[in-house]
Image: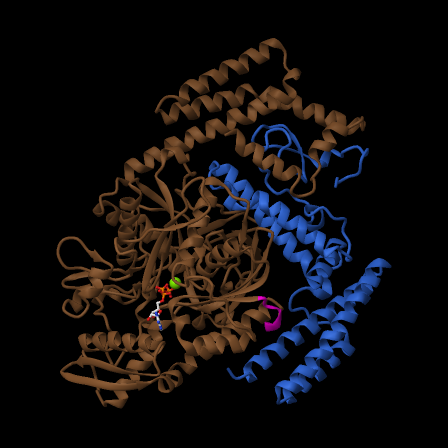
Chain colours: A brown, B blue
Amino acid sequence: MLLQIHEPGETPEPHALERGLAVGIDLGTTNSVVAIIHSHEDRAEVLRDQCGDGLIPSVVAYVGDEPVVGRAALAMQIEQHGRVVSSVKRLMGRGIGDVKMLGGSLPYELADDSAGGMVRLKIDDRAVSPVEVSADILRALKARAETKLDQPVDRAVITVPAYFDDAARIATKDAAALAGLEVLRLVNEPTAAALAYGLDTAAEGLYAIYDLGGGTFDISLLRLEKGVFRVLATGGDAALGGDDFDHALAEWVIADQKLGKLTPVGARALLIAARHAKEALTAQDSVWLDCDVDGHVLHVNVMRDVFDQLVDGLIARTLRACRQVLIDARVEAADVQGVVLVGGSTRVPAVRHRVSKFFGREPLADIDPDEVVAIGAAQQAKALTQGSDTLLLDVTPLSLGIETMGGIVEKVIERNTPIPVTKGQEFTTYQDGQSGMLIHVLQGERETVDACRSLGRFELKGIPPMVAGSARILVKFAVDADGLVTVSAEERLTGAKAEIEIKPSYGLTEDEMAGMLRDSLTHAREDMERRLLIEARVEAERVLLALSAALKADGKLLDAAEKAAIDGAIAQVRQAMSSEDRDRISATVDILEQATHGFAQKRMDRAIAQALTGHSLDEVEKSMATDEPNDRAVADATSAAGRK
Amino acid sequence: MMIGGEHKAIPRAALAECWSCKGPVSVQAIFCHTCGAAQPPRQIDHFARLGFEPGFDLDIDLLEKRYLGFQRSVHPDRFANKSARDRAMAEQQSVSLNEAFETLNDPLRRASYLLQLKGQTASVAKDQTVDDPALLMEAMEAREALAEAESVEAIEKLAIKAGADAINLLSEISKAFAADDLAAANRLTTRLKYLRKFLEETRARRVALESF
Ligand SMILES: Nc1ncnc2c1ncn2[C@@H]1O[C@H](COP(=O)(O)OP(=O)(O)OP(=O)(O)O)[C@@H](O)[C@H]1O
Ligand SMILES: [Mg+2]
């Protein structure tokens, strides 16, 4: 099978002993949270500040030498408006066309070179990418965790909206790399919430997770059963959240007060005031919006009814997505046993009301909607580093396809397909003698290229001259457990191949990345060397363990001389492993593999001989059968793990 | 459960070499019985992968139980601490299990796949025109009825009828496979495919009419 399994340059997970702690991070549009589960414990601890606050506002102020993150940055929003950045998650992996205006102005200033690639924000004379801003937030989270735990933290499970596309996922991973965090896994936010909720309450059955945060909306349907968390379908909108509620209210104020065009500062001030008013309306029926906008001193009364009407269309959009997810999962609203609300915007009474009406039941409110995602991330971080009995099966949120004639998208992987997944589809040439084929990879649900998001283009070259329609080009898509996409293409008759790791124009280039890594003074190079050494050791250890199992089972096939030769080669490997010399380790492993060649041959010959003569094969057959799950397969897995 | 029976000889083709300890393993094995290494998924059919004989009638609960059980042991989350090669093998297994389960869990896909296994593909292939005038006629009529349906209730009625037809078709398909009448199975599967498409359209129409 032609499968692109891991990204180039990725190295195996080095042993826990040599590493720092692993945490779970909810990197939110408005607020971020970091949590951990200590070894030998089940409960997650949210890492809080001195005041007991677990939320860190996802706001960065570029004033002085070091970026200021969190509450302190929030407090500078008005005075230092040009240097304070918020809601940057909305811009992750996005182009300038995706940015929303208010009163004819953007609440940020954009750098001029933004055209084409990912937007960049202008801060004084610098252009800062959303990836860098996210990295600064992640650094602050890492620092908080290290201070609280008094130990280095260098790995994390980071959550992303389920509906995030590939570009936004890659941008998130890039941000983590800049912050010196290895991403153990990107987990979808609603899935993380379900994990935390399910493990906490031992809930079983069909659950809907409705997550409306500051910038994004996700709806996921999961089946919870005996430690298995299976996502049946997921949907949402990566640009719909509380920020849009603020926006709707601000637009209303502009119209009501006949404000006309605003400056960026004015737009920012109005949005902040709108957000305060909105939040106050959750507990009151009527509030005053007070704000100074470009010289106008506003004192506007806002009634809950008015606000409800303003956001009516936005809530309707979330419910439409809910309907679609029910259809995709082939279930009815009545089949859903519980609706879990996640995210600050689910506090809005109109949201609660409409969601409970849609599902025909009161949503569950026995969890903290602000922290549940980070807790789920911490649980997954623990599972990945220390093992676990639970199983998380997720899906790909968006269909993947390639452009065909006439700007039509041919889907290769449908949305809601369980991941990891690999799927291929054959295409052919449409002109005689066509020697190359441009493959344009798209993500989205619409039929036409313009309506989907472009993930990248690559060219398959070297197709030999053939009549139109006779080449057989196999395009393979792979989506891994992080939801990241790899695409490869192969001409089947000649074997011409092309492959891309999707680095969308929205992501950072390798050069930019390398430059930033240098800037941020992480010792990338040394780190790489160390990881390669660890990788070589892990591989050598694997070879020794496999061989020792083989010797235990079939060692009797060897005579004394053969056995001695193998033992000698084993000793060489052991010695090499205790050195720091990666090449020596690899060389001795090669020699060992050579030395055991005859042994492998003997084992195979015996098995074939037994198979051919049809002798009592009880032993062979028993051990080779594919047994019931939970029985032998699992026993093998655990014993293999136990041996390391 | 054992694949291949209790005392049958293992054919040569059923043996493969473990990539890790180089010993013999069954092509169906997910893990090597000697060294415990996850094996790459080999070329076996989806039924065999989940421990079934090829056939249309399937114990869905058992299918799901096996799928989840196997997935529990090979899912990438279980291999985060292993070497790159171990992880790659397990991930490929996980991919194959997903594919096998997705194919067998849906009766339409299962029927199409079974026909393909038995060398019958023609009329269920994607976008192929169908040589069944009666079916085309019916499909057209159904579509007209849907286009004329103006209310959620009217659409619901059409959907309920189509749903009932689909259930009947499933039992007919099952009978055709049981009688090894592949031509009939093929024809009925094509019919089911059309019905499914129609059902999807009714849902889409319903959502479009629904107000939130
Ligand atoms: N009491 C309240 N009433 C109304 N809205 C509220 C209330 N409290 C918080 N919010 C809104 O919730 C949003 C923040 O929610 P949350 O912290 O869950 O988002 P996030 O996780 O940062 O964002 P996302 O998940 O979209 O990336 C903001 O828009 C905020 O105004
Ligand atoms: Mg959130």
Which quarter of the rendering shows the N terminus of chain A? top right
Q: Of all residues shown, which one is farthest toward the right?
A: B179
Q: Is residue A448 above or below residue A579?
A: below
Is residue A296 shown above or below A530? Answer: below
User: x, y (%) of residue A568?
Assistant: 50, 13
Instruction: Report x, y in % for residue A515.
Output: 24, 48
Relative to the observer, which residue lies in front, A455 or A56?
A: A56
When the figure is inspected, residue A154 is found, relative to residue A112, above or below; the finding is above
Range of magenta residues: A333-337
| Res A250 seen here | yes
Return the x and y of residue A176 as percentages of the image width and height. 33, 51
A80 left or right, relative to A361 = left
Nearer to me, A72 or A267? A72
Q: Decide if residue A323 is on the left or right side of residue A124.
A: right
Q: Is residue A438 left or right of residue A145?
A: right
Name the residue at 77% across, 66% down. B170
Name the residue: 66% across, 75% down: B199
Visible in this render: residue A240? no
Classify residue A416 by image quadrant. Answer: bottom right
